[in-house]
Amino acid sequence: METKDVIADIRKSRGMTQDDMAARLFVTRQAVSRWESGETTPNIETLKAISKEFNVSANTLLNLPDGAVCQSCGMDLTKVEDFGTTEADGAHTDYCRYCMQKGAFTHNRSIDEQVELNLHFLDEYNAAKRLTFTSDEARRELKTHLAGLKRWR
């Protein structure tokens, strides 16, 4: 389902008019109308507000499958603010905000350099996923995982 359809569904399922939704988000009714018609897409800040106000996941709003990851570093993309943006319109990308901003990569690392950077977060990753990867095990897994992501193919 496209973002425009998700926004319309959120509004309609709550019995709200476009005016009602606009008031809750501090935007105009015309803005809501343009989102629902697909003429425009809410910017990242507004998507965050929609996500919070109506308890809708970023993946749902952005028409991404659950479990979406940055296509450069492999970071889980779970919140709207996690996503990088395009240059032209500030729309979301398949990359996190640490890897892409305004349509450009924020760094020019090799895949091996990215693996080593990711290893700095190994303890946090192990705790979050309830795993016990050693550095060597994680290095091998990361290299395989990253090689399958869009940026490294």
Image (cartoon, rainbow, N blue to C red):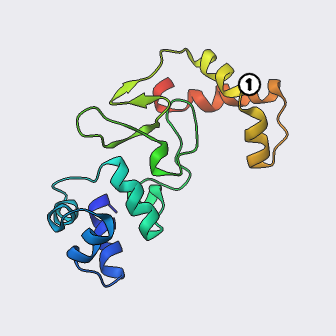
> Is residue 62 in sight in this rendering?
no
Q: Is residue 145 left or right of residue 11?
A: right
Query: Percent x, y for residue 141?
Result: 72, 31
Front one among 89 and 28:
28
Q: In the image, what residue occupies the spot 38% across and 62% down?
A: 50
Q: In the image, what residue occupies the spot 48% across and 68% down?
A: 55
Q: Is residue 115 left or right of residue 54?
A: right
Quadrant containing the N terminus is: bottom left
Which residue is tagged 1? 139
- Identify the image quadrant of residue 134: top right
Give above or below for 15 relative to 119: below
> Is residue 1 in sight in this rendering?
yes
- Identify the image quadrant of residue 123: top right
Amino acid at the residue labelled 1: Arg
Query: Percent x, y for residue 2?
Result: 31, 59
Disc 1 crowd, CA 10 A, few/some/many (<14, 14-19, 20+) = some
Give above or below for 76 relative to 136: below
Query: Percent x, y for residue 38?
Result: 19, 58
- Identify the image quadrant of residue 48: bottom left
Q: Is residue 68 left or right of residue 117?
A: left
Query: Percent x, y for residue 147?
Result: 57, 26
Disc 1, SS: helix
